[in-house]
Amino acid sequence: MYKLQHYLYWTFRVLLQVSLLTLFYIIGEWINMHTTLTIPGSLIGLILLFVALEIKVVKPEWIGLGCNTLLKVMPILFVPTLVALMDYGPLFMKSGLFLMFDLVLSSLIIFFMTGWFTQFAVNYKQNRGRSV
């Protein structure tokens, strides 16, 4: 009986936390629909969530379990995309080398830009802490 209670409590917490994350997504989509911003609503919701976490309106423990659960099931969401790629076999046979070059180059650019920006943000935060 205890295991069932524990599992139900865990499930309720995950559903509640994923609902909170979904609320930020919905707010971002609503802002996107009612403004002339060219930023996708999901990105607006992500920015709002970041701001809410930074100003401590939302605490990380309020969404941590839901985020971890979503990260665990994320690979399952890519399976339909990979299966759909099998329909484009002739395209990959014809232009596969160019597509691989494009994928590798764009991945490297994203990788290095993300690393650079993260390092910049860490250094900025450290320098800001010293000057205060």
Image: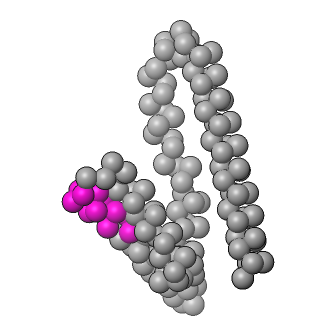
Q: Residue furthest front?
A: 131
Q: Is residue 72 left or right of residue 130?
A: left
Say whether residue 52 is magenta.
no
Instruction: Look at 66% across and 53% down and name the residue there.
Output: 117
Res 112 quadrant in image: top right
Q: Residue furthest bottom?
A: 2
Q: Nearer the viewer, residue 112 or 107?
A: 112
Q: Residue 13: percent from the left, percent from the top? A: 48, 81
Q: Residue furthest top?
A: 94
Q: Nearer the viewer, residue 61 or 41?
A: 41
Q: Residue 108: percent from the left, percent from the top? A: 68, 36
- Is residue 121 shown above or below 19? above
Is the C terminus in the top left, top right, bottom left or bottom right quadrant?
A: bottom right
Say whether residue 30 is magenta.
yes
Q: Main secondary structure of the magenta part?
A: helix
Instruction: Look at 33% across and 48% down and name the residue there.
Output: 38
Q: Is residue 62 visible?
A: no
Q: Nearer the viewer, residue 15 or 96?
A: 96
Residue range corresponding to the magenta coloring:
24-35
Instruction: Look at 57% across and 90% down and name the residue there.
Output: 2
- Is residue 51 shown above or below 109? below
Q: Is residue 52 left or right of residue 31?
A: right
Q: Is residue 85 visible?
A: yes
Instruction: Look at 42% across and 78% down and name the residue there.
Output: 16
Q: Residue 102: percent from the left, percent from the top? A: 59, 25
- Is residue 68 shown above or below 16? above
